Amino acid sequence: MHLKIMVSGDNRDYIPFSGNTGSDSIPRRLAAFQAHLNRTGKVCPRPWCWRRFYNLFKPGYEPPWLTSWWATSTRDKKDLFLKQMEYQAWQTNHFHEAYQFLMKIDEKHWLFNK
């Protein structure tokens, strides 16, 4: 899977999520992931997928579960999800695996902007 790079001045069109995962590429990978979410309209995984993601990767910040899911704004869900991905990128060695997991989730298991 490749994502378009959204970094100005870069002459490459896409950045693969395989290969080098050094800290020098973390900001670019996070920017590419956020650009992917914005381009596709994805907000975050739906509750059961998000719980599975949380249980697998322990991304530092607990998402709203079913009891508070409907009361949490779409913007807050997306902000929290992005914080989890930042935590994965900077505090763990599992950003690549977390990304791969998220890209395999079927479209119907994502919350989209309306």
Image (cartoon, rainbow, N blue to C red):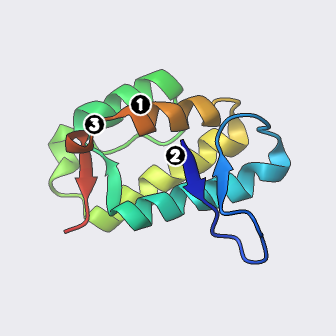
Mark 3 or 1: the one toward you: 3
Examine the rendering and report whether any part of residue 34 can be seen.
Answer: yes
Q: Are marks 2 and 1 in contact (CB under 8 Å)?
A: yes
Image quarter where the N terminus lies is top right
- Among the 4 quarters of the image, the one containing residue 14: bottom right
Please identify the quarter of the rendering in which residue 23 is found. top right
Instruction: Report helix, strand or loop for mark 3.
Output: loop
Label 1: element kind: helix
In this rendering, the count of numbered labels is 3
Label 1, on which residue? 53
CA distance for labels 2 and 1: 10 Å
The amino acid type of the residue labelled 3 equals: Asp
Residue at the spot 46% in from the left edge and 30% down from the top edge: 101
Which of the numbered marks, if any, corresponds to residue 19? none
Q: Nearer the viewer, residue 94 or 63?
A: 94
- Above or below for 103 versus 8: above
In the image, taking residue 31 as reference, residue 68 lies left or right, namely left
In primary-sequence order, the first of circles 2 and 1 is 1
Q: Which residue is mark 3?
A: 106
Q: Are marks 3 and 2 in contact (CB under 8 Å)?
A: no
Q: Nearer the viewer, residue 19 or 38?
A: 19
> Which amino acid, by three-letter code, is at mark 2?
Gln
Q: Kindly identify which residue carries mark 2.
A: 84
Residue 32 lies, in percent from the top left, at 59, 58
In percent of width and height, residue 31 lies at 62, 62
Residue at x 26%, y 44% (from the top left corner): 107
